[in-house]
């Protein structure tokens, strides 16, 4: 959960001598060569070192590029990295950034195929009080034919309750 993510982030921060230099290297490499010059470990560390809005935007751009590339060739750690991104958004209260990532065209496969990232996004919406939006996400998943939505249904019912709906 979020506690494990925070502990992992703290450990990575302690292991990186100059986080600003690391982020600058990732930014420069990505702007020059896209994903070609980045390793999945670079992207993973970037998730843990996000402190500013600019850092978060860079992480979002890298993940969107990776998810676009993953349509042609699978990237093994990508689902976990997208989950880390949503965990970072939840930790830092970046609801708008998470929403932008969720709605990005390259993220469509994550809606149905990657339960952990999906649950983290929905939990972020719930914790931020965006109950109607969470219900929209849930109903969209249902319409798309997703069948394994037990935990998502729990969040949806809790949202209905928070909204005072008799459907809850």
Image (cartoon, rainbow, N blue to C red):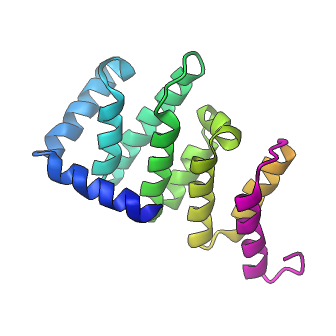
Residue 154: say if magenta.
Answer: yes
Coordinates of residue 108 in the picture (x, y in percent):
67, 36
Note whether 141 is above or below 158 in the view shown: above
> Is residue 82 something one can see in this rendering?
yes
Q: In which quadrant of the rendered view does residue 153 lie?
A: bottom right
Note whether 27 is above or below 120 in the view shown: above
Q: Does residue 80 appear left or right of residue 48 in this picture?
A: right
Note whether 10 is above or below 105 in the view shown: below
Note whether 157 is above or below 116 in the view shown: below
Coordinates of residue 27 in the picture (x, y in percent):
28, 33
Coordinates of residue 16 in the picture (x, y in percent):
16, 45
* Residue at x-position 16% and y-position 53%: 14
Q: Does residue 27 appear left or right of residue 164 in this picture?
A: left
Q: Which residue in the rendered view is the most extreme toward the left?
A: 17
Task: Say how many tags the image has.
Answer: 0
Q: Does residue 48 appear left or right of residue 102 in this picture?
A: left
Coordinates of residue 61 in the picture (x, y in percent):
44, 36
Which quarter of the rendered picture does the C terminus lie within?
Answer: bottom right
> Is residue 132 something one can see in this rendering?
no
* Residue at x-position 39% and y-position 57%: 5
Q: Which residue in the rendered view is the most extreme toward the bottom?
A: 164
Magenta span:
144-168
Q: Does residue 2 appear left or right of residue 8 in this picture?
A: right
Residue 80: say if magenta.
Answer: no
* Residue at x-position 63% and y-position 34%: 105
* Residue at x-position 42% and y-position 56%: 88
């Amino acid at each position: 959960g979020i506690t494990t993510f925070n502990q992992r982030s703290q450990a990575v921060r302690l292991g990186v001598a100059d986080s600003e230099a690391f982020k600058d290297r990732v930014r420069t490499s990505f702007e020059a060569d896209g994903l070609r010059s980045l390793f999945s470990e670079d992207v993973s560390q970037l998730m843990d070192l996000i402190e500013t809005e600019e850092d978060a935007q860079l992480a979002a751009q890298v993940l969107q590029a990776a998810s676009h590339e993953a349509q042609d060739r699978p990237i093994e750690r990508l689902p976990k990295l997208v989950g880390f991104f949503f965990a970072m958004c939840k930790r830092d209260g970046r609801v708008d950034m998470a929403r932008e990532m969720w709605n990005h065209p390259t993220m469509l496969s994550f809606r149905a195929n990657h339960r952990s990232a999906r649950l983290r996004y929905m939990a972020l919406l719930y914790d931020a009080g965006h109950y109607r939006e969470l219900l929209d996400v849930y109903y969209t998943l249902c319409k798309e034919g997703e069948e394994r939505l037990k935990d998502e249904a729990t969040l949806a019912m809790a949202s209905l309750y928070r909204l005072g709906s008799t459907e809850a």
